[in-house]
Image (tube, rainbow, N blue to C red):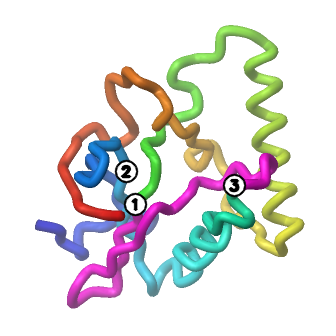
Amino acid sequence: MFNAEEVSLYGSIMDAVRISDNKPVMLKAVSRIIHPQEVKIGMYFSDKSIASDPRNHCIPIYDVFPVADSEMDLIVMPVLRPFENPQFDTVGEVIAFIQQLLEGIQFMHEHLVAHGDEHHDGWLPNVSQRLEYPGSLAGKRRPISCS
């Protein structure tokens, strides 16, 4: 059972599997009090009209579930991993990564959104397109029903 009191300042994450299509996803618990705009901004960048822009490198939000009797939301997003795992093989990969990172920040700024706490813990590649993936940031998979 989810315990909202155990969520850290920056949220808690866990892996899950979406029952509707057996797709691996990640769940993140977000406090509406500590981070009141996170879900709203994430949903804005997940809108089809904006998500289709190739400069949009924001993590898409597939669904949001309010947690009963708490100020928490569970957001459903693709499986993510630390940016340095696996390590870069070539200088070209590093350059492409930095280019995408800066392009994504510029895109957010064009939409009048500042990330506000940019650091390496927030640089998380989407690995949901991989057919074989041994694990993710959270490490545990649980079924969840979401659209």
**Whole-number angstrom distance, CA of label 2 to CA of label 1:** 6 Å
Instruction: Compare residues 79 and 118 and report the one nearer the observer.
Output: 79
Q: Look at the image and tell me in which quarter the C terminus lies.
A: bottom left
Left or right for 77, reference 135: right
Helix, strand or loop at label 2? It is strand
Picture coordinates of residue 136, whole percent (x, y): 37, 35
Instruction: Compare residues 33 and 27 and report the one nearer the observer.
Output: 27
Q: Do residues under tags 3 and 2 come within 8 Å of each other at their CB atoms? A: no
Helix, strand or loop at label 1? It is strand
Q: Which residues are magenta?
A: 52-75
Residue 56 shown in magenta: yes
The residue identified by callout 2 is 26
Left or right for 32, reference 124: left
Q: Do residues under tags 2 and 1 come within 8 Å of each other at their CB atoms? A: yes
Please say whether residue 97 is visible from this viewpoint: yes
Residue 142 shown in magenta: no
Q: Which residue does the image show at 40% across and 72% down from the upper left? A: 64
Residue 76 circle label: 1
The residue identified by callout 3 is 118
Picture coordinates of residue 52, whole percent (x, y): 72, 55
Badge 1 or badge 3: first in the primary sequence? 1
Amino acid tagged 3: Glu
Q: Which residue does the image show at 22% across and 43% down from the upper left? A: 141
Amino acid tagged 1: Val
Name above or below for residue 25 compared with residue 64: above
Helix, strand or loop at label 3? It is loop
